[in-house]
Amino acid sequence: MFVMNSIGQNICLLISIAFFVIGGGISLSRLRWEKSWSRIAAKACLYFGVSFAIAVLIWHSISRRNWLLLDDNFAALVWLAVVLVFFVLYVQRRKPLGGLDWFIMPIVVLLLIGAAATGLANPSTYNVHGLVSWMHLLTSYGGAAAFAVAAAAGTMYLIANYRLRHKVALAGPNLGSLERLEHLTLSAVTLGFALLTIGAVTGFMKMKFEHRSAPAAKVILSLGVWIVYALVLHSPINPSFRGRRAAVLSIIGFVLMIGTIVAVVLMPSG
């Protein structure tokens, strides 16, 4: 059942975006002004932002009378943003990693802006039927979330590595050790690669069952992502791909993944 998003849902989503932008700005300000209230304010904005995003998902589901969060591209983008925010909250609560939100929150904001754009237009529903279709969507979007984490960790690795090599000291929270950032990158890539592989296999199965083919853009981008992250996974046994090269490849792979998501959103029926 298709129901166009209400003005209230779009306003609620814009409020969520505003909280994430404000929280990100406060967090970045700690590079120059480390205030006692800034960390608390940034975290509060994070909680308010994710609360409004979840409210949008609930409101959207009620209006459509459908609680399947991956049934259309609007809900899928908001859901992916919420997953990334919960990852940041989990890491910062269990074993804080300074500056992680600087790199994850821009991705969250872009996802929500994309959702807002599709919400103002006509959100496209996915043709989701059966276990194979659901496995394809869950593993594809789950892999995208894991690769976003890998790209953030890879970016942090490059910055921390630059600081060490050039002995540059910046204000603000410590980004963490190179070993921890490399471990986080490889762990996220391992999870994302497994999910992406399952998503690709189930995607081909879905096409075979429905007797249709996928647009060339989706196939080429997905194959590029798979190859790039396959190289990153071999970094532990290939010293030439460890460290900075693995970090760079994780970022390149995520850029290709963003292209794949754009292709999925624009061509959901393919």
Image (cartoon, helix red, strand yellow):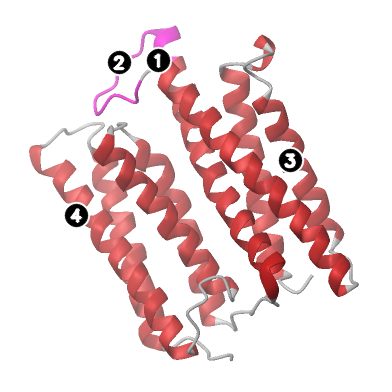
Local SS, label 3: helix
> Disc 3 versus disc 2: distance between alpha carbons?
36 Å
Does residue 144 appear to the left or right of 83 in the view shown?
A: right
Q: Which residues are magenta?
A: 162-176
The residue that disc 4 covers is 44
> Disc 2 versus disc 4: distance between alpha carbons?
28 Å
Does residue 248 appear to the left or right of 161 in the view shown?
A: right
Note whether 119 is above or below 206 in the view shown: below
| Contact? badges 3 and 4 (CB < 8 Å) | no
- Local packing at callout 2 (Cα closer than 10 Å; few below 14, some 14-19, many 20+) is few
> Disc 3 versus disc 4: distance between alpha carbons?
37 Å
| Contact? badges 2 and 1 (CB < 8 Å) | yes
Local SS, label 2: loop
Q: Residue furthest front?
A: 131
- Local packing at callout 3 (Cα closer than 10 Å; few below 14, some 14-19, many 20+) is many
Lower position in the chain sequence, tag 3 or tag 2: 2
Q: In the image, what residue type sits under mark 3? A: Trp
The residue that disc 3 covers is 226
The residue that disc 1 covers is 163
Q: The C terminus is located in which quarter? A: bottom right
Q: In the image, what residue type sits under mark 2? A: Ala
Q: Nearer the viewer, residue 133 or 264?
A: 133
The residue that disc 2 covers is 169
Q: Position of residue 126 (x, y in %)?
A: 67, 76
Q: Quadrant of residue 123?
A: bottom right
